[in-house]
Amino acid sequence: MTLLSAVVKIVANIFAVITVAIVVPFEVSSITWHLKFYFGNGSTSAIELVTFGVVEDLAVRIQYAKEIKEITGKEQKEIRESAIGNQWKLTKSQQARLQSDALVSHTLHPTSAINSGMVQKGLVTTFVIIQSQVSSASESEKKEANELRLALEQQMDQLRVAHQKQVAALRDEIAEKQQLINDIKDSNQKLSLAQQQLQSEYEKVKTEESEKSQKLQELITTNERREQARKDLRGLEDTVAKELQTLHNLRKLFVQDLQARMKKNLSAEDNEEDGGSLAQKQKISFLENNLDQLTKVHKQLVRDNADLRCELPKLEKRLRATMERVKALETALKEAKEGAMRDRKRYQYEVDRIKEAVRQKNLARRGPAATIAKPIRSGQHHVVVGGGGAIRTGPNMGTPKTVEIARKRESLIINEKDACNDYPHGTSKKKKKLSDKILPQKVRDLVPESQAYMDLLAFERKLDSTIMRKRLDIQEALKRPMKQKRKLRIFISNTFYPAKEACADGPDGPGQEGSVASWELRVEGRLLDDSKSDPNKVKRKFSSFFKSLVIELDKELYGPDNHLVEWHRTLTTQETDGFQVKRPGDKNVRCTILLLLDYQPLQFKLDPRLARLLGVHTQTRPVIISALWQYIKTHRLQDAHEREYIVCDKYLEQIFGCPRMKFAEIPQRLNPLLHPPDPIVINHVISVEGGAESKQTACYDIDVEVDDTLKTQMNNFLLSTASQQEIQGLDAKIHETVDTINQLKTNREFFLSFAKDPQQFIYKWIVSQTRDLKCMTDVVGNPEEERRSDFFYQPWAQEAVCRYFYTKVQQKRAELEQALGIRNN
């Protein structure tokens, strides 16, 4: 029974071992080894003991293998091999049984296809092996097995202790790292708080500094005003002190005089009655009262003077405004005078035309006259002198100056219209603002290189403002006459043609007619620097510099009716390069040439007294008035109380004939003192003493005023549109690029928000699209909510029903009243 019970226990233990082997496959071979060594003897009690020990050892090793994952299958194999090689001494019969048992253990591995039949076959084979090995087990092998088990347990304990130490060390290291991380977080938080505090303190200090600088500026301004007021007060105090000292001295002298007179009266009239001395006392008291009143009046005058000094800047501003109005009125008056001058020229032209017609009729009655003068230019009709000797021009004598100006203006207007038509971006398109060029802040933060573009944009804004300011300056400069002085060289030449005798007809041919002796005088000129200028530039004609030309010949030689040759500018005058006069004669002739310059704008000759006073001989009216105003300011002739009045000194009083006049009266009072400018007088002798057809020339230089060449350049600059077209094209490209950048920025934000939170993005996008769809289709309400019945169970539904029925009732009531003819008053 004992043997049977031991076998039953062994079978039970084998079932347990097989179950464990299925769970942990790599331990099956170890169980087989232990069984082979334990069952080598055959003792029943030893087999039972060893079997339970093996099972216990196996359970401990399996539990430890679950806890310690670092022991791999390779290490377990090495442990088994070392134990087998060092402690287990197997015999050849035991090794043979071991190989057969390995086949049995292979059948128990979980990776094989284990079924119930194979398990039963393995159990039977194992039971047979155990039964055959029970009898062969020995005591020595049991001891070796126990020692081996103890050695394995010790090794497992050592490995367990080492692993626990390693785990403890790792946990300590993790704790230290976590402590270090916490310390770093605390220090970072402290530093951020310190930085925020320093930033707030910096902002506070910066604000205080700006406030202090502003207060300092205000204090500096206040101090300057205070210093100016102190200086004014010092001046007033000095003036008041001087006046008071003067009054005190006068009073002292007056009192001394009174005392001296009183002493004289007392010594001379000791016997005079008491009534006389009483009258003297009354006079003295009366005079003292008068002196006190005068002192009060003087103090009041000093106060009024101080008030007037305070009002002086205001009055100066008013005077400047008045001066500007006066200038505007003078400009209007000048334009009116120019219009009147044009009308007068037009009237003079009609009068000259009528006179010319009458003169032609008179010449037709008298007969043909000699040709005297003609302009020096090919294709030009000769200048014919009538009975009075005045030069008259042919039918092709030029165009009026006003017509030329009108043509120029018309050409400028046409050019401007063409420029507007050629402009790529017409006025029909809306002009984009400068703010459309600015990049958004997000784009600038995303692309650091965009700061260079913003700097260029700021520079462009400054450049545009500078160019616009310069354009305005040029426009203002073009409103004023821009003249420059040039040298005009006048060439006066004469040629003598001796007399020729008539020849009769001969065999050589017909004879020649005889001619009397004659001379020819030419007057021509040019600017000195014309040769240095641009050859393509149109040269100004000689006659354009003058208003009239008169040649006076010797009256004794040519009589009172034929000694004058005159040329006057008219509206139909055509410019010429010179003048030519031809007369018969064989004697030297003294002639006087009078040239009257054509000043634009008009210039006047001043009265000699006013010319010496102002240092101006001939000038335009605005320059003369400006020089007179400068003289008035320099000599302080403006009235201190009534600033619109001018107090004339002795020179102005002699010139204008009044001691005081208003400033607005100066242009009117200047009219009698302005005279036409003096003509240029040239005395010339026409010599006939040279050889036949010899030319004698004399040169004279005079100063003339011509239009500044810079004026044409300024006009061209203001009228040029090529650069504007290019700038507008570049601006259009910039606007398109900025629009593209903004579109790309919108797309980037769209996809970036989708990448960050797709669910929320799609939800918001659907909501937005739904809102847009409602706006596009004009849908009222929310169809998605209205299709559910819960929507109509909300509190608003009852109120809506009441309102609906009330409206229907009112509508039916109104229809009924209308049908019955009832009016609701």
Image (cartoon, rainbow, N blue to C red):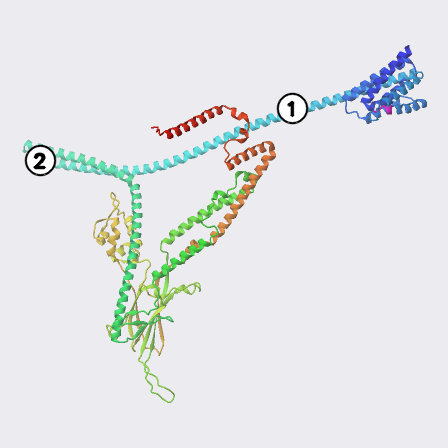
Q: Indicate whether 169 appears above or below 224.
A: above
Residue 179: assigned label: 1
- In the picture, the quarter occupied by the C terminus is top left
Q: What percent of the width, then of the height, locates residue 788?
A: 55, 27
Q: Residue at x 6, y 35 (%)?
A: 269
Instruction: Give the residue number, with chain letter if any, for mark 2.
Output: 267
> Farthest residue toward the top?
1
Left/right placement of residue 727 relative to residue 687 reads right
Give the residues in magenta: 105-109
Q: Is residue 353 left or right of residue 195?
A: left
If the image is split into quadrants, where does the N terminus sit? top right
Q: Nearer the viewer, residue 515 or 138?
A: 138
Q: Position of residue 781 (x, y in %)?
A: 50, 31
Q: Check if residue 451 falls in the magenta segment.
A: no
Number of other residues with Cα within 10 Å of mark 2, as a class: few under 14, some 14 to 19, many 20 or more: few
Q: What number of labels is visible?
A: 2
- Secondary structure of residue under mark 1: helix
- Dividing the picture into quadrants, the one containing residue 380 is bottom left
Query: Secondary structure of the magenta portion, mostly?
Result: helix
- Residue 701 in view here: no
Q: Classify mark 2: helix, strand or loop.
A: helix
In the picture, measured across the screen, residue 479 lies left or right of residue 273, that is: right
Report crowding for label 1: few under 14, some 14 to 19, many 20 or more residues within 10 A (C-alpha).
Answer: few
Q: Residue at x 80, y 18 (%)?
A: 60
Alpha-carbon span between mark 1 and mark 2: 125 Å
Q: Position of residue 814 (x, y in %)?
A: 39, 29
Image point 40% across, 50% down: which residue?
473
Q: Decide which of 627, 535 is in the foreground and name it.
A: 535
- Residue 88 visible somewhere in the drawing: yes
